[in-house]
Image: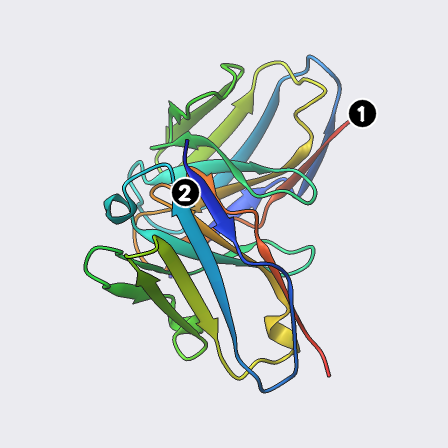
Amino acid sequence: DIQMTQSPASLSASLEEIVTITCQASQDIGNWLAWYQQKPGKSPQLLIYGATSLADGVPSRFSGSRSGTQYSLKISRLQVEDPGIYYCLQGYSAPLTFGSGTKLEIK
Amino acid sequence: QVNLLQSGAALVKPGASVKLSCKASGYTFTDYYIHWVKQSHGKSLEWIGYINPNSGYTNYNEKFKSKATLTVDKSTNTAYMELSRLTSEDSATYYCTIGVMDAWGQGASVTVSS
């Protein structure tokens, strides 16, 4: 199975700050990487697919990038509505696997 | 707009089975695979498997192969997941989601307790 190592586990940042979350894949997954945001008591919501493509309706302050087997989600200017848990997902091969999650809070 | 409406919370006894439903609307049911995802309380997400609603073909995470059975009813645009021989480890919220997981059901809580 492909392991997705996500970091950090938790993160506290100030409003308007730049935030970066990373996922390291245990093998090549190409661009088969998505990012999700989950708020308490809610279903996950797709932010980024294909490693870098912004999902419909997602604010442009979210962006995704790839360097080899390392993938990053960047929030360019943290907003009050951005706290939650963020997950990466590899869709390259079954079983599909998620990262362990990053809990983002406002400082 | 795409909507996935899941069945409500279930309280089931150890050793029993439960069948969860996911009724789809707002798109052509056979156009997208339907995935099921497990989230234990306070934990990350686990992919259970998917079903191709057109052919009925399924692909399971090995971990859930003897636990979950995925089916669909094309006449009602509904997907089902049956979980068998339930234990406390199966207590979780279960989601259905489609395609690149850009639409999700609201989740169904399953509690296994005597």
Query: Of discs 1 and 2, which sits in the foreground?
Result: 2
- Residue type pointed to by label 1: Lys
Q: Is residue B30 above or below residue A69?
A: below
For label 1, the residue is A107
Please identify the residue farthest to the left as the structure is shown. Answer: B55
In the image, residue B76 lies at what x, y percent?
34, 55
- Residue type pointed to by label 2: Met
Q: Which subunit holds the residue at mark 2?
A: B
In the image, residue B88 lies at what x, y percent?
66, 77
Between A22 and B7, the residue placed more toward the observer is: B7
Q: Which subunit holds the residue at mark 1?
A: A
Q: At numbered mark 1, what does the secondary structure look like: helix, strand or loop?
A: loop
Q: At numbered mark 2, what does the secondary structure look like: helix, strand or loop?
A: loop
Q: Is residue A79 left or right of residue B26?
A: right
Count the labels in the image.
2
Q: Quadrant of the N terminus of chain B?
A: top left
For label 2, the residue is B101
Residue that appears at 52% across and 17% down: A59
Please identify the residue farthest to the right as the structure is shown. Answer: A107
Residue that appears at 38% across and 56% down: B78
In the image, residue A49 lies at what x, y percent?
38, 33
